[in-house]
Amino acid sequence: MAKKKSSAPVSSETATPEQIEKFAEKIVSDWGCVVPGERINEYDSNRQSISTGSTKLDWALTKSLVEGTINDIHALEGVGKTTLALEIAASATLMGKPVYYFDLERKLVDSQINMISRLRKDLFFRIRPGNGEDAVNKVLECVMDIPGCVVIFDSLTQMLPEVEDVGGAEDQQMGLVARLSAKMIRKILSPVERNRCMVLFISHITANMEMYSGEIKTKGGKAVPNACAQRIHMKKLAAGKIKNESGDTIGHNVTCKVVKNNQGLPYREVLVPIIYGQGIERSLDLLQISEELAIIEKSGGWYSYQIDGETKKTYKDELLNNIRTNVGFRDGLIKQINEVL
């Protein structure tokens, strides 16, 4: 077979600075998807970050859940994935962003929504699609039509492909969820970035069939982990119970490890206190990080701190109540934390 001849001679010359500049002006004006290197930082810094509701976890993420990104929370059952997702939803609604919560597990009820008191219900929408393909189409419609929206997908594990939905229980279908997840990611990546939306996937850790593998397995293949800007692995501590004065367990300290982070350093690990029926205990969260940074010092049962140039001492319950009710004191504490971090 004859070789195809080149239609143009091969050039041995390098483009001149004038040619490069002229072409740069052309692609910036004509293509619309080009950001010059000197403007990339300005372009990225204009994107808002959505708080997780925990000061410690926000610090671990460096920039928490940035607009225009896909993110992921994964853990075993009963650790607090939905609680953290609702805290993120509350932060988004306080910023005026609508939140579309895709409840594929069909477990989200009014009592869970009500436990997050700062969540604006007028900007929160629970969606229960019929099957996996229906969910993909609805997610795509949200991120294409509503700029700046937040989509929470709970969860990839329960996404039911249409073939499984209409087929018999005895039919064998392999890798359907992984292929459907990969297709969804490819379809939404561009509109999510273009419209500055934020998509949060919730995944369950599944059984690892490889005897000697220590890798954490989540359903849906590698498409979602690969596309994520930030991934949070949650784990409940056996010795992390939070008890009241009567000795009853009212919550748990949950380890949140940032296993992937395109916005800062990965593998930071923090303890987040979650109270059953209330969500993240933000006052306790602030107290814990203030202790770690020596802004508040503990001596026996006493806590000492500086306020208006004066050193004060108090018990834990009184200090927590002060953080919870005194807005000025809480804001001052957050300001000191941010200065140290």
Image (spheres, helix red, strand yellow):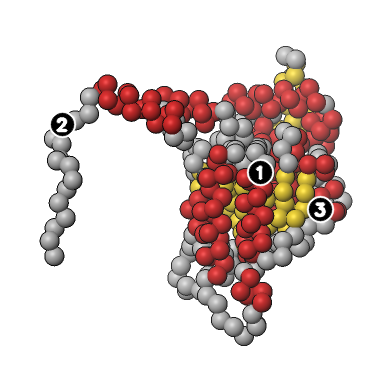
> In terms of image quadrants, where is residue 12?
top left
Q: Is residue 138 above or below residue 316?
A: below
Q: Give the amino acid type for the residue marked by disc 1 in the picture.
A: Asp
Find residue 13 and name its label.
2
Tell me: 238 left or right of 233: right
Marks 3 and 2: which is nearer the front? 2
Distance from the alpha carbon under mark 3 to that under mark 2? 66 Å
Which of these two is toward me, 239 or 193? Answer: 193
> In terms of image quadrants, where is residue 27?
top left
Q: Give the amino acid type for the residue marked by disc 3 in the picture.
A: Gln
The local secondary structure at tag 2 comes to loop
Which of these two is toward me, 151 or 222? Answer: 151
Q: Which residue is mark 3?
A: 112
Tell me: 107 left or right of 24: right
The local secondary structure at tag 1 comes to helix
Residue 258 on image: x %, y %? 55, 47
Residue 218 on image: x %, y %? 56, 63
Marks 1 and 3: which is nearer the front? 1
